[in-house]
Image (cartoon, rainbow, N blue to C red):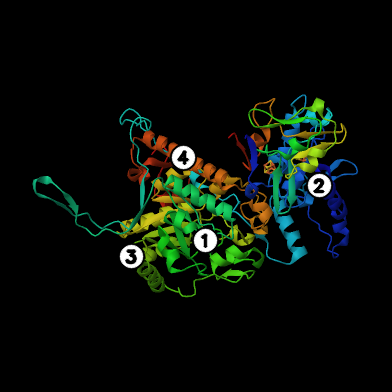
């Protein structure tokens, strides 16, 4: 029986293998070089065909007649799925060494993009975040530690607080102390806040952009660790509302997909999405093929229709309009939930953030130049927006100067890679950070940037039922919780080293940062001194 | 009865369970040597696919095993721990058990004119397919 199954697959493969190449419509001869080279050690390859089955691009092919494995390098996207799953480590997949004449101006990537465009005449799409060598300010900021004059703290022996509250804080704290100093009461008006156990929240990734299993894994991990995930603009499936609603930030975006009173009220917080770091000023487009029955139900649109998110919110053309939506959402949720407004980091981000806070937002979320996406025009992803470090410092400074910093929490996204980035962000003034790409990487993603194809080999950014089952939420959520736990431990160690025992005391405390290799203007924007000063 | 159970919803059809089953029942227990330099044993777990649905099938170690009742030579029997065991030396290769098994859990070894079946990796002490499945799509129920 075993043989039969193999035989059947072999027959099908042999029939379709290379022939499909000859049968298709005549296409223009492609002038592109393959991006990756595949090296298979024949000494190790046992013809198990795992690579063939794991590759959604159809790169590997078994030939039954010759008992040999073949591969078509031009199909390979370098996701490394085959290399990781090959049981004998017989595969190496690496960037193709073929080069054009070296040219600092006309790089291989520029040439390839041009050729691709000449062949298709379209906009070049991509996924994930900006991969261009813009300065990464995190790598030019160093942290402080205690020596002699102030003691450091050992987080393993002493309590260390990472708990964070997101939402508006009162302007001043009035306290009434009862007679004989009994019963202390807070007199000032308090606003709804959400408590998170660590200042790390999962970024907005919609069900539709990512698979149900990936979405559920994020929800499970957020709930287990006591933090939040963000539904993105694709709604929250009914099946997850009871279990995970209280760990969700639900988005209200320009397409208004999946928004109903229940959606808003099961959540921990509501977020109005104005923009996204990977594609500021650009809307979204989920192609009809991805709108399956379950997604159509969640997004409240007919099955198989394109889900189009317009570039602007058509009812928001001013801060006053934004204010109306913020209060409409507060009204709809009985003033019990903080409302966040998410924007992309652009040139006037500080002034815009100030307007957002004045419009009544309880959280300002800012997504930087390196923020990820499921699909965006490459030209936009790589050229629009500003680095999150500068945007964050500018916004925090502006809100402080205007005396309204307490009125909103700052959540930043786009470019966090490890716990040091998190702690530096907090020292620059963030209340908490969103992580998207790190969470995907924890689940398996290798940042191959092919999210937009819908054929994610790791089962994350796809709706293909053969691929989505690759992501087991039990395992993926464990990996995510481990990531949160590991980073939180490291943050505690770094805080302890600085002699601080609560993350609150580091927030906006730029004295714990020094710049290395930065220009005067950059130090000014960041509000930090140079190292040695 | 101890047995290996599949979770179809997370089985991705990689067939690695078959690969490692082969290694577990090889002489060398080395994957490259087993496949390339030994007479490759048959896997006792079989991944059945009707894409996108796919899951692994192997002996259920049934409470009332049809294969044991069907076996004409007494090669198949149920031991004290509840496992359905195959005594190769007694097998005459009549394949009655193959026809009797309602699950398709018995594999024909044509070269040796015998059958092979899941022994829960008796030699190793723990079912290797369960240990090596990369997606936790196989679970071992000792009960
Ligand atoms: S997964 Fe590895 S061993 Fe198996 S066929 Fe592919 S290259 Fe060969
Ligand atoms: S190893 Fe696991 S996931 Fe792969 S085919 Fe076997 S049972 Fe399915």
Cα separation between marks 1 and 3: 24 Å
Chain letter belonging to callout 2: A
Badge 3 element: loop
Q: Which residue is mark 2?
A: A5
Badge 4 element: helix
Q: Is mark 2 within 8 Å of ligand 2?
A: no
Q: Which residue is mark 3?
A: A335
Q: Residues within 10 Å of mark 1 (few under 14, many from 20)?
A: many
Cα separation between marks 4 and 1: 27 Å
Q: Which residue is mark 1?
A: A237
Camera-nearest label, 4 or 2: 2
Q: State the residue in front, A523 or B122.
A: B122
Residue most extreme to the right = A65
Asked whether, in this view, residue B97 is left or right of residue A352, the answer is right
Q: Are marks 3 and 4 on the same chain?
A: yes
Cα separation between marks 2 and 3: 60 Å
Upstream in the sequence, badge 2 or badge 3? 2
Which part of the image, by quadrant, shows the C terminus of chain A?
top left
Q: Is residue A531 visible?
A: yes
């Amino acid at each position: 029986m075993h043989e039969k199954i193999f035989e059947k697959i072999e027959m099908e493969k042999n029939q379709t293998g290379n022939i499909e190449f000859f049968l298709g419509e005549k296409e223009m001869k492609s002038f592109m070089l393959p991006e990756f080279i595949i090296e298979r050690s024949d000494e190790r390859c046992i013809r198990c065909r795992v690579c063939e089955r794991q590759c959604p691009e159809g790169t590997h092919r078994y030939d039954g007649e010759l008992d040999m494995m073949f591969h078509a390098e031009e199909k390979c996207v370098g996701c490394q799925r085959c290399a990781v799953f090959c049981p004998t480590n017989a595969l190496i997949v690496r960037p193709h060494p073929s080069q054009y004449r070296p040219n600092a101006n006309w790089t291989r990537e520029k040439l390839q993009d041009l050729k691709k465009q000449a062949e298709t005449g379209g906009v070049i799409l991509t996924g994930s975040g900006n991969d261009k060598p813009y300065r990464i300010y995190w790598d030019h900021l160093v942290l402080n530690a205690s020596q002699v004059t102030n003691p450091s703290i050992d987080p393993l022996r002493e309590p260390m607080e990472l708990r964070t509250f997101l939402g508006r804080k009162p302007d001043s704290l009035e306290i009434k102390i009862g007679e004989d100093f009994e019963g202390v009461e807070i007199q000032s008006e308090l606003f709804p806040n959400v408590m998170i156990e660590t200042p790390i929240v999962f970024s907005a990734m919609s069900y539709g952009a990512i698979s149900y299993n990936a979405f559920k894994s994020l929800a499970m991990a957020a709930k287990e660790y006591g933090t939040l995930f963000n539904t993105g603009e694709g709604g929250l499936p009914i099946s997850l509302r009871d279990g995970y609603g209280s760990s969700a930030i639900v988005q209200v975006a320009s397409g208004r997909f999946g928004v109903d009173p229940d959606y808003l009220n099961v959540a921990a917080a509501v977020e109005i999405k104005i923009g996204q770091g990977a594609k500021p000023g650009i809307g979204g487009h989920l192609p009809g093929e991805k709108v399956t029955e379950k997604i159509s139900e969640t997004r409240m649109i007919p099955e198989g229709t394109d889900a189009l998110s317009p570039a602007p919110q058509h009812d928001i053309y001013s801060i006053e309009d934004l204010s109306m939506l913020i209060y409409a959402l507060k009204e709809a949720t009985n003033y019990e939930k903080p409302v966040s407004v998410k924007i992309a980091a652009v040139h006037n981000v500080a002034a815009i953030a100030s307007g957002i806070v004045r419009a009544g937002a309880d959280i300002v979320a800012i997504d930087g130049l390196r923020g990820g996406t499921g699909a965006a025009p490459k030209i936009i992803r790589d050229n629009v927006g500003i680095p999150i470090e500068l945007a964050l410092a500018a916004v925090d400074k502006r809100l402080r100067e205007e005396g309204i910093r307490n009125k909103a929490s700052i959540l930043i996204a786009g470019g966090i890679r490890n716990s040091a980035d998190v702690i530096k962000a907090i020292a620059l003034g963030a209340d908490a950070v969103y992580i998207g790409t790190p969470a995907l990487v924890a689940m398996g993603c290798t940042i191959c940037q092919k999210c937009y194809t819908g054929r994610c080999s790791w089962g994350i950014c796809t709706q293909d039922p053969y691929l989505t089952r690759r992501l087991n939420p039990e395992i993926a959520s464990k990996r995510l919780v481990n990531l949160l736990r590991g980073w939180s431990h490291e943050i505690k160690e770094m805080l302890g080293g600085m002699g601080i025992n609560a993350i609150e005391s580091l927030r906006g405390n730029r004295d714990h940062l020094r710049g290395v290799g930065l220009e005067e203007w950059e130090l000014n924007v960041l509000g930090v001194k140079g190292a040695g000063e | 009865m101890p047995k290996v159970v599949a979770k179809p919803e997370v089985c991705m059809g990689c067939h690695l369970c078959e690969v490692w089953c082969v290694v577990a029942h090889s002489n060398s227990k080395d994957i490259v040597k087993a496949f390339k330099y030994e007479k490759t044993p048959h896997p006792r777990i079989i991944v059945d696919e009707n894409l996108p649905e796919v899951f692994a099938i192997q002996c259920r170690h049934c409470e009332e095993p049809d294969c044991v009742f069907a076996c004409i030579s007494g090669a198949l029997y149920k031991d004290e721990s509840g496992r359905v065991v195959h005594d190769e030396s007694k097998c005459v290769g009549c394949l009655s058990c193959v026809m009797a098994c309602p699950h398709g859990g018995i594999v024909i070894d044509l070269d040796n004119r015998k059958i092979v079946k899941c022994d829960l990796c008796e030699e190793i002490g723990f079912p290797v397919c369960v240990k090596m499945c990369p997606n936790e799509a196989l679970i071992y129920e000792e009960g």
